[in-house]
């Protein structure tokens, strides 16, 4: 099980597309656009909900059949953590790549640019809420997934930067100075002192 996670506009799809994971994959945004007549814009909530249900069925079926797969998520809920637990109970190795930016204004700006280019949009308030929830679920993901790689993708046009990795809950900080967003995500957790 491979999960590409992070707040909206962090660059998940561009730097770690699930289609290149080498296994069966499902991207909710792409499926929602397909159900919306090929358009990423103005996707009705019922179509997005249908795409989410199809993704859950895809995951459930792959776990039951013992087939490797990759999905993308904002990690705004604990659903991916529950799915990872189910996958591990069925003998899967679970991996997550988490991508975020240091300044939420950059997330909002990148999504606006994406929307102007024909991609899917979200309001600044929704982006902020998902961002907060996603970072809030990251510490639990470090405990739930067998391996996690955490990347900072803040540099405009620059390379993503591996800042930490975990193996079965054991954390190794790669960056000399963790980005602000990571320090904020870990404040008040067992990972908070670095």
Image: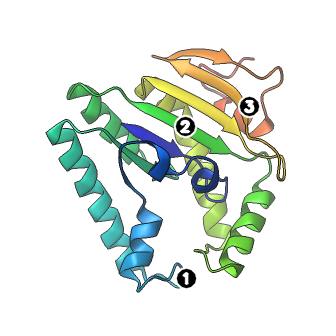
Coloring scheme of the render? Answer: rainbow
Look at discs 2 and 3 and give the one toward the viewer: 2
Tag 3, which secondary structure? helix
In percent of the image, x 52 and y 78: which residue is there? Answer: 40
Left or right: residue 19 versus residue 151 is: left
Could you say which is closer to the camera, residue 106 or residue 127?
106
Q: Dot 1: within a 10 Å radius of its alpha carbon, few (fewer than 14), some, or many (20 or more) residues?
A: some
**Percent position of residue 65, x then y:** 15, 40
Which residue is labeled 2 in the image?
97
Q: Quadrant of residue 182?
A: top right
Which residue is labeled 3 in the image?
183
**Vertical order, 10 against 173 (above or below):** below
Q: Please identify the quadrant where the N terminus is shown.
A: top left
**Percent position of residue 31, x then y:** 39, 69
Calculate the distance from the C-alpha at mark 3 to the C-alpha at mark 1.
34 Å
Calculate the distance from the C-alpha at mark 2 to the C-alpha at mark 1.
27 Å
Q: Quadrant of residue 81?
A: top left
**Percent position of residue 154, x then y:** 79, 46
Tag 2, which secondary structure? strand
In percent of the image, x 67 and y 53: which residue is there? Answer: 10
Q: Are marks 2 and 1 in contact (CB under 8 Å)?
A: no
Q: Which mark is residue 41?
A: 1
N-terminal-most mark, 2 or 3: 2
Left or right: residue 119 versus residue 35 is: right
């Amino acid at each position: 099980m491979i999960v590409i996670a992070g707040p909206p506009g962090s660059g998940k799809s561009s730097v770690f597309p699930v289609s290149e994971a080498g296994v069966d994959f499902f991207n909710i945004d792409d499926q929602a656009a397909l159900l919306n007549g090929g358009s990423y814009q103005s996707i009705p909530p019922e179509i997005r909900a249908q795409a989410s249900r199809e993704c859950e069925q895809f995951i459930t079926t792959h776990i039951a059949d013992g087939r490797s797969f990759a999905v993308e998520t904002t990690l705004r809920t604990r659903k991916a953590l529950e799915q990872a637990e189910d996958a591990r109970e069925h003998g899967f190795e679970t991996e997550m790549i988490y991508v975020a930016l240091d300044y939420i204004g950059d997330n909002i700006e990148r999504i606006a640019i994406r929307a102007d280019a024909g991609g899917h949009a979200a309001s600044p308030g929704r982006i902020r809420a998902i961002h907060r929830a996603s970072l809030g679920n990251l510490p639990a993901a470090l405990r739930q997934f067998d391996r996690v790689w955490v990347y900072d993708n803040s540099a405009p046009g620059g390379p993503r930067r591996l800042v930490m990795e975990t193996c079965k809950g054991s954390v190794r900080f790669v960056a000399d100075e963790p980005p602000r967003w990571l320090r904020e995500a870990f404040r008040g957790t067992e990972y908070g002192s670095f």
